[in-house]
Image: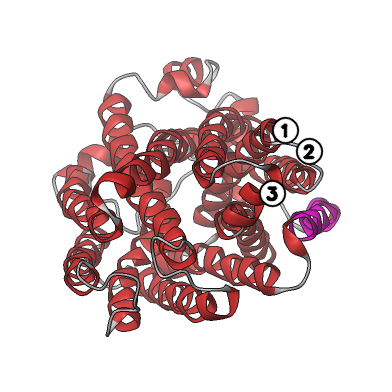
Amino acid sequence: MNRSVLAACLGWMFSAVDIILLILFQQDVADALGVSVQVIKMATGVGLLGSALGGIVFAQFGDRYGRVRTLGWCVILYSLATAGMALSPNAAVLIAMRFLSGVGTGGEWSVGFALVAEVSPRAGRGTLGGLVAGFFNLGTFLAIILFQAPLGWRGAFAVMALPALGVLWLRRNVPESPVWVALQEARRRGDVDPALEARMRRAPVRLLFRGRMLGLTLRTTLLFTVMNFAFYAFSTTFIDYLQSQGGLGLDKKHQAPYQLVLNLVSLVTTFAAGALSDRISRRLLYALLCVGGVAGAALFYLVTHDAGASVPSGLMAILALTTMSYGINGIIGTITAELFPTHLRSTGPGFCQNVGKGIGGLAGPIVAGTLVLSHGFPFVLALPGALMLGLALLIWTLPRVDGRAVAPVEDDGYLTRATTT
């Protein structure tokens, strides 16, 4: 179990470096390539659109060919594509490389959480899910270090070729999910109900739109769309607020404390939320964290709307409060892994999370960047708070499946039991 969890953690960590580096270096990259920051924000969105494709394609590979093998393919793709961004002569090549790296990170998310859900004990599944999600924040710390180091943006992206070498360790030392292996053995023996076996022979993504899976897929995808719109609208706008002359206009040295506080609070909250979700309802905890985000966004607006170009009093503390809502990332991976049956445990979360990321993540930076021009930074930085209120309500449309037993061969009967308890 330990090696499997470590593999998922490292995959999640380096995918964060891949995503966050471009956000941090957006002004440097724009200046070097002779384009506006808005073009680089579009590149961020295009990468998230690529993750939608990766979530659909690679997540199905995870259910068909195994969690560990597919995880290795994803790491190789996003590592080499991100390193390829270092060689970009213009924005078009950068955007193309960003799309390919997004395809790799899209597949990695769902495959990693499927693997963790199937090797972890029921009582500790939330804790391990929070641990994996927290490695995204550790990856963000690594991205901040690369941003602050004297490597420049090309050197920082080039470093991302190194994780591809870790796939050799992955393939030699990490065992395949025993639940997935048991499912394949049951199918070979003919121990699977013929009707269920017939469904499994179809493309996995098609099964997400049949019977009870249809409503579950649509609701979960909507949840992820709103989550990613809020996250990427806030994160890209906040970095722009720190860097641009229309905001605070801080240099790298003076940006660093805000970047570190944002990430440290998110890291601690993500770990804590995962552990706490083993003790109380995951849906309730998710909703409470969202409500905290609403309060933080309201305070954010109050302290920034009249501050102009000066650093508002209490900004750091309010940023910390707002960022606590990111603890929802320590819960949602475990929730979605438990929502879908074993033969769809990679495909279901992968489709929902990455289509949501592709739509919300693409629209968030573009809409936020446009609204900054007409409404200013304070309004745009507070906007995700209203979306958090919607998330607090949306989470209750999903059935409660906390800590359910995960069997190799599953139909959708557990959903009936979940909705009646």
Residue under the point 86% across and 53% down: 168
Q: Nearer the viewer, residue 84 or 196?
A: 84
* Tag 3 near tag 1, CB within 8 Å: no
Location of the N terminus (image quadrant): bottom right
Q: CA distance from mark 2 to mark 1?
A: 7 Å
> Which image quadrant is residue 65 in?
top right
| In the depicted structure, whether residue 358 falls above or below residue 336 | above
Q: CA distance from mark 2 to mark 3?
A: 40 Å
| In the depicted structure, whether residue 166 falls above or below residue 338 | below
* Tag 2 near tag 3, CB within 8 Å: no
Left or right placement of residue 213 versus residue 189 in this view: left
Residue under the point 30% across and 58% down: 377
Mark 2 residue crowding within 10 angstroms, few (<14) / some (14–19) / many (20+): few
Residue at label 1?
93
Left or right placement of residue 77 versus residue 371 in this view: right
- Is residue 130 highlighted in magenta? no
The mark tally for this picture is 3
Residue 277, how many percent across, how many down? 32, 68
Residue under the point 32% across and 28% down: 213
Residue under the point 38% across and 54% down: 231
* Label 2 secondary element: loop
Q: Which residues are magenta?
A: 154-171
Question: Which amino acid type corresponds to the residue marked 1 in the rendered image?
Answer: Val
Question: Which amino acid type corresponds to the residue marked 2 in the rendered image?
Answer: Pro
Residue 122 appears in the figure: no
Residue at label 3?
176
* Tag 2 near tag 1, CB within 8 Å: yes
Residue at label 2?
89
Question: Which amino acid type corresponds to the residue marked 3 in the rendered image?
Answer: Glu
Colouring of the image? secondary structure
| In the depicted structure, whether residue 355 falls above or below residue 113 | above
